[in-house]
Image (spheres, coloured by chain):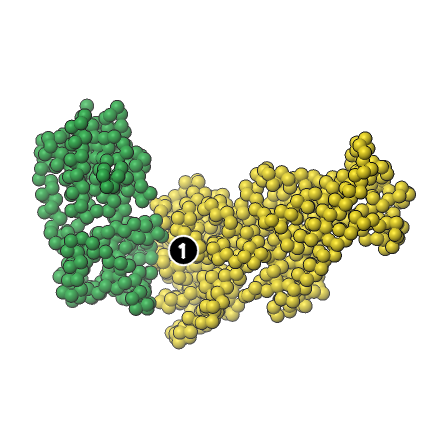
């Protein structure tokens, strides 16, 4: 170490860096320690594989270049790019410059940051190029900072209707972050005024400052710069900026195949800490846009979770439509995390569904082509069940109506509310009954059940179809023939099968055969929730109504004859107080059947 | 120009009684209804609670004086807009005819809840699910059915139900169900009757006594619990799923006939006029100025409101309210 390249002002910086790394180390070790068995198994299996390389690529793409934010909102993406890429490049290029200056690889570590102050005017390779590049990068970061300032004041200019509210520690970190780069600019310019070692930006500003008694301000400016860095590093692990490191960790663990488990684990902490509070989820949340709730969105729920503030009103107030999951640039499974926080520990000691084991099944002897599971919600819309029966008969299916009289539930509503033991008991029982039928397909009319069968039921012995898929299948292979009518229709994608399971084309194929299908705003994976979601237990009837009305109005802008949906719950919600014709796709199909 | 002292929109019990009273004060009245006959919703019921008196008899009494020279009756006339012009009220019908008067009385009443909106009860899907209005036709003998062995009544269909946007109690269905169960029991003594309720609100004179008699003398079973869904059986019956909240147990009941006690909503006409004149309540009914002191007046001068276009009422209440409105209108005309 060269003693000439030391000045006491680096102490705050060094202290900050050491505290930061200790904090990060403790956090990371604790999260990894708290992974459960299954998750650790995935990590050990995949850590030495191409998945790691894929993870490195994704980390570069998302954590440095922020491609996902770019795709959604280019200006916001540019702002994040400025900070992430700009700052990293400043450090990397700074290090290269320091190495070139000293002439050997092992230099004092702080030189990469404070080189301008310690430069003694000697020549080194590519000196001017480095000065130019470093100034270019600083300009780049400063342009991002300008956007950040504008966003704070006029968020709408950056295409965001609402931006995140801050906590006090966020504010300190934010202010110190905002100070870092202007202070660096001033410190380097002041030094350049005396030493003439700046680039296009710092030297120009330095020449301006040279008229002032600038030599008195050089050291204080470098001190201020170092202290700003120190403050930011110390506060960072307790603020939104923790995402800078957690996000990288999350990318790796996700690529290694780790997913959320039944209970909170270290991975949950990684997800919670990877949230940058960018606020993109606020604008897509219908509880905000249609019902005026502005403290329940994923960003706020996750912040509460990080600060260990448990607010059941916030935790329970979520439609679980997954619009925010779809929009999240970090890819955090916000609704799954929320589900974990709903865990009902006390209730999980008792299993109310023990009695189910005594139910006997009478469907063992026959051979069925279809096992039909209507779902609880379809029992509230008997017209759907009737239509499905007609369609099965018309297609000549030998079907077994599993839940005709058995009061079976797929268990998803329980799972969503955190009653895991009970949900597991139901799942086991329902799996057994379905498998007893030995049918070729399991068909369900309820998107919630479908999602649950596809994502939760791992022991089903037959492929699962939602009735939209089934109807598409039998119309394509000619089992039933549909007559095209002169009806204008729009289709509403139910959240659970659209965003949840990517069923987009099947219902549209069917509807195009029965009438004139028009497209709407918020289609496919941008679909809106009807508001009637059973996942939300904190919402009032009037708010459900507000959301339902808003969604209905968006969908029916083109004044169609019929609003078609494929979910009994959506159908019921839309029917509430809108007299206009709301129908399930199965009813439309029955209306178009060629009854000979 | 057709000029009247008062135009009454709606020739149901409220409109008829108000017209009759105003005619007695020697006021010229125009009584308008969209239907082809007078009586409004009174025509849907055969006998009235709590004394089983005939609705047609009441209607005859009410319309006795309608052929009076002071009353002009216009049926099949659908008023689509009401305007105030220079202290005169004008009502325009769908054919473009305009009627003028010094005052206007809204007596557009209620509609029964459309049971199709509670799809889980299967109205319009299963043929043995009917409404209380349909049941009246069976009780009057207009429609005949085979003797049912089990009948279930479901209370509060479209009332006290956030999910259909009706947070109010329709107040007449409880006692109406008691009346209908007794009539049904008289018609089919061997039929078992179950009535599912949330609360039974027997507030009127001799209602409670009728409720007691329905249980003691007629053996009607009252079950406290909301029916969640109705599904069909192989032998063309229906199964009701419900919870008996007094026993805290789920229950299933197979029935041959289900009667949905449909509630009272503001009628389509009430909603349209209320909206147009900006005097509507959040529940769709028309708002009076003050329910204690000026319950017939509205915020608009010369515009009055009576009967079930304001809120749910029984027939005796409607009668009193209509007389009250007529007196107030007469006083108003005297001050001009």
Q: Which chain is green?
A: B
Visible residue check, residue A497: no
Chain drawn yellow, letter?
Answer: A
The residue that appears at 15% across and 59% down in the rendered structure is: B209
Please give left or right for residue B95 compared with residue A44 in the image. Answer: left
Please state the total of marks drawn on the protein image.
1
Quadrant location of the C terminus of chain A in the rendered image: bottom left
At 64% from the left and 58% from the top, the residue drawn is: A250
Residue highlighted by disc 1 = A568
Q: Position of residue A411 (x, y in %)?
A: 45, 65
Does A403 sit above or below residue A288? below
- Say whether residue B48 is left or right of residue A441: left
- From the viewer's side, name the closer residue of B47 and B208: B208
The answer to whether A322 is drawn above or below residue A352 in the figure is above
Q: Residue drawn 70% across and 48% down? A: A84
Q: Chain of mark 1?
A: A
Provide residue A334's location: percent of width, then percent of height: 55, 56
Q: Is residue A175 left or right of residue A380?
A: right
Q: What residue is rendered at 19% in x and 23% in y? A: B1
**Rendered position, B257 above or below A187:** below
Image quadrant containing the N terminus of chain A: bottom right
Where is residue A327 shown, x and y percent of the image? 57, 50
Q: Residues within 10 Å of mark 1 (few under 14, many from 20)?
A: many
Residue A408 x, y percent position in the rendering: 40, 66
Q: Is residue A169 visible?
A: yes
Q: Secondary structure at mark 1?
A: helix
In front here: A399 or B232?
Answer: B232
Horizontal arrangement in the rendering, residue B299 relative to residue A417 (left or right) = left
Closest to the observer, A106 or B234: A106
């Amino acid at each position: 170490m060269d003693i000439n390249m030391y000045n006491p002002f680096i102490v705050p910086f060094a202290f900050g860096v050491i505290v930061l790394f200790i904090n990060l180390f403790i956090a990371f070790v604790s999260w990894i320690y708290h992974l459960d068995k299954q998750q650790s198994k995935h990590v050990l299996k995949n850590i030495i594989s191409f998945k790691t390389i894929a993870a490195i690529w994704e980390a570069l793409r998302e954590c440095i270049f922020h491609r996902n934010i770019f795709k959604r909102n280019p200006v916001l993406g540019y702002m994040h790019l400025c900070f992430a890429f700009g700052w990293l490049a400043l450090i990397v290029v700074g290090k290269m410059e320091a190495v070139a200056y000293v002439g050997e690889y092992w230099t004092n570590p702080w030189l990469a940051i404070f080189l301008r102050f310690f430069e003694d005017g000697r020549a080194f390779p590519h000196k001017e190029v480095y000065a130019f590049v470093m100034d270019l990068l600083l300009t780049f970061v400063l342009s991002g900072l300008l956007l950040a300032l504008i966003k704070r004041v006029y968020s709408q200019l950056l295409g965001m209707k609402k931006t995140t509210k801050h906590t006090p520690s966020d504010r300190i970190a934010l202010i110190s972050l905002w100070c870092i780069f202007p202070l660096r600019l001033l410190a380097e310019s002041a030094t350049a005024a005396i030493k003439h070692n700046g680039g296009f930006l710092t030297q120009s500003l330095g020449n301006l400052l040279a008229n002032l008694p600038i030599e008195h301000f050089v050291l204080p400016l470098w001190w201020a710069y170092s202290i700003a860095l120190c403050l930011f590093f110390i506060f960072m692990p307790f603020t939104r900026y923790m995402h800078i490191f957690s996000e990288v960790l999350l990318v790796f663990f996700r690529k290694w195949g780790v997913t959320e488990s039944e209970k909170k684990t270290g991975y949950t902490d990684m997800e919670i800490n990877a949230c940058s509070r960018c606020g993109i989820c606020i604008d897509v949340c219908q509880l905000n846009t249609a019902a005026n709730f502005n403290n329940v969105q994923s960003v706020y729920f996750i912040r509460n979770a990080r600060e260990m503030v448990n607010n059941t009103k916030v935790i329970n107030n979520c439609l679980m439509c997954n619009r925010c999951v779809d929009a999240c640039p970090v890819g955090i499974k916000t609704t799954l995390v929320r589900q974990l926080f709903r865990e009902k520990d006390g209730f999980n000691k008792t299993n109310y569904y023990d009695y189910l084991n005594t139910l006997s099944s009478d469907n063992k002897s026959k051979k069925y082509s279809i096992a039909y599971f209507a779902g609880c919600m379809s029992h509230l819309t008997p017209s759907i069940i009737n239509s499905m029966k007609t369609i099965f008969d018309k297609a000549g299916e030998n079907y077994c109506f599993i839940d005709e009289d058995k009061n079976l539930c797929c268990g998803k509503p329980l799972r969503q509310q955190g009653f895991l033991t009970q949900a597991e008991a139901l799942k086991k029982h329902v799996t057994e009954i379905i498998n007893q039928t030995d049918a070729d397909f399991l068909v369900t009319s309820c998107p919630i059940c479908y999602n649950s069968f596809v994502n939760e039921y791992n022991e089903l012995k037959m492929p699962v179809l939602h009735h939209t898929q089934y109807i598409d299948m039998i119309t394509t292979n000619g089992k039933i023939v549909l007559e095209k009518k002169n009806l204008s229709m729009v289709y509403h994608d139910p959240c659970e099968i659209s965003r949840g399971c990517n069923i987009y084309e099947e219902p549209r194929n069917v509807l195009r055969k029965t009438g004139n299908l028009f497209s709407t705003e918020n289609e496919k994976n941008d679909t809106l929730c009807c508001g009637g979601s059973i996942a939300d237990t904190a919402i009032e009837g009037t708010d459900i109504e507000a959301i339902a009305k808003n969604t209905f109005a968006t969908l029916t802008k083109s004044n169609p004859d019929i609003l078609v949906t494929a979910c009994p719950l959506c159908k019921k919600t839309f029917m509430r107080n809108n007299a206009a014709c709301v129908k399930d796709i199965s009813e439309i199909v029955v209306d178009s059947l060629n009854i000979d | 120009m057709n000029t009247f002292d008062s135009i009454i929109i709606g020739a149901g019990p409220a409109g008829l009684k108000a017209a009759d009273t105003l005619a007695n004060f020697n006021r010229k009245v125009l009584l308008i209804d969209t239907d082809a006959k007078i009586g409004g919703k009174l025509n849907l019921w055969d006998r009235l609670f709590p004394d089983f008196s005939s609705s047609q008899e009441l209607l005859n009494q009410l319309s006795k004086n309608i052929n009076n020279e002071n009353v002009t009756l216009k049926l099949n006339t659908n008023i689509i807009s009401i305007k105030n012009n220079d202290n005169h009220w004008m009502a325009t019908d769908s054919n473009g005819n305009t009627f003028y008067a010094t005052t206007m009385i809204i007596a557009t009443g209620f509609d029964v809840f459309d049971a199709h909106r509670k799809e889980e009860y299967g109205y319009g899907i299963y043929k043995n699910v009917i409404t209380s209005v349909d049941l009246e036709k069976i009780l009057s003998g207009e429609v005949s059915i085979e003797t049912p062995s089990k009948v279930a009544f479901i209370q509060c269909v479209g009332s006290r139900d956030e999910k259909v946007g009706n947070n109010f109690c329709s107040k007449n269905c409880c006692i109406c169900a008691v009346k209908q169960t007794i009539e049904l029991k008289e018609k089919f003594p061997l039929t078992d009757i179950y009535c599912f309720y949330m609360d039974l609100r027997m507030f009127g004179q001799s209602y409670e006594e009728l409720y007691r008699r329905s249980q003691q003398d007629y053996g009607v079973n009252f079950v406290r619990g909301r029916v969640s869904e109705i599904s069909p059986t192989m032998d063309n019956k229906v199964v009701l799923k419900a919870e008996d909240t007094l026993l805290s147990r789920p229950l299933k009941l197979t029935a041959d006939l289900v009667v949905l006690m449909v509630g009272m909503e503001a009628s389509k006409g009430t909603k349209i006029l209320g909206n147009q004149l900006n005097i509507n309540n959040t529940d769709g009914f028309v708002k009076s100025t003050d329910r204690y002191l000026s319950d017939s007046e509205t915020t608009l001068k010369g515009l009055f409101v009576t009967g079930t276009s304001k809120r749910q009422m029984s027939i005796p209440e409607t009668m009193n309210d209509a007389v009250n409105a007529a007196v107030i209108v007469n006083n108003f005309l005297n001050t001009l």
